[in-house]
Amino acid sequence: MDANEAIGIIEAEGAGPARRWGNSPGDRYGRHDHPYHKVLFCLSGSIVFHVDDRDVELGPGDRLDLPAGTAHAATVGPEGCDCVEGSRSVTG
């Protein structure tokens, strides 16, 4: 999957605008959550998301959906990662 395809999917689902980002090998994100539904595609490399009950490893072409309020951390794989993500507001 390339960036344009991932952006198209995210925006067609109403989770845009999508943004592209990347990280260096071994980078980490501490535990946090978001007030929105996160949609993420890994384009290259790898990243592991750590949620309460499991680890979710993403490689090229993999998708992750994180519901609003889901606490998570992340660890970037040994080759770094390149991702595209978007968010969908949660209305009550």
Image (tube, rainbow, N blue to C red):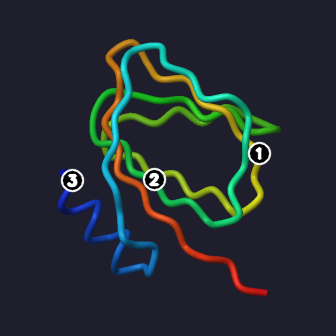
Q: Nearer the viewer, residue 12 or 21?
A: 21
Between marks 2 and 1, how big is the CA–CA gap?
Answer: 15 Å
Q: Is residue 45 left or right of residue 38?
A: left
**Residue that appears at 31% across and 36% down:** 82
Which x, y percent locates residue 17? 36, 70
SS of the residue under disc 2: strand
Q: Mark 2 or mark 1: which comes first in sequence?
A: 2
Please tell me how crowded label 2 is: few (under 14), some (14-19), or many (20+) other residues with Cα within 10 Å. Answer: many
Please tell me how crowded label 1 is: few (under 14), some (14-19), or many (20+) other residues with Cα within 10 Å. Answer: some
Q: Is residue 75 left or right of residue 15?
A: right
SS of the residue under disc 3: helix
Marks 2 and 1 in Cβ contact (< 8 Å): no
Q: Is residue 34 left or right of residue 59?
A: right
Q: Which residue is mark 2?
A: 40
Marks 2 and 3 in Cβ contact (< 8 Å): no
Q: Which residue is mark 1?
A: 71
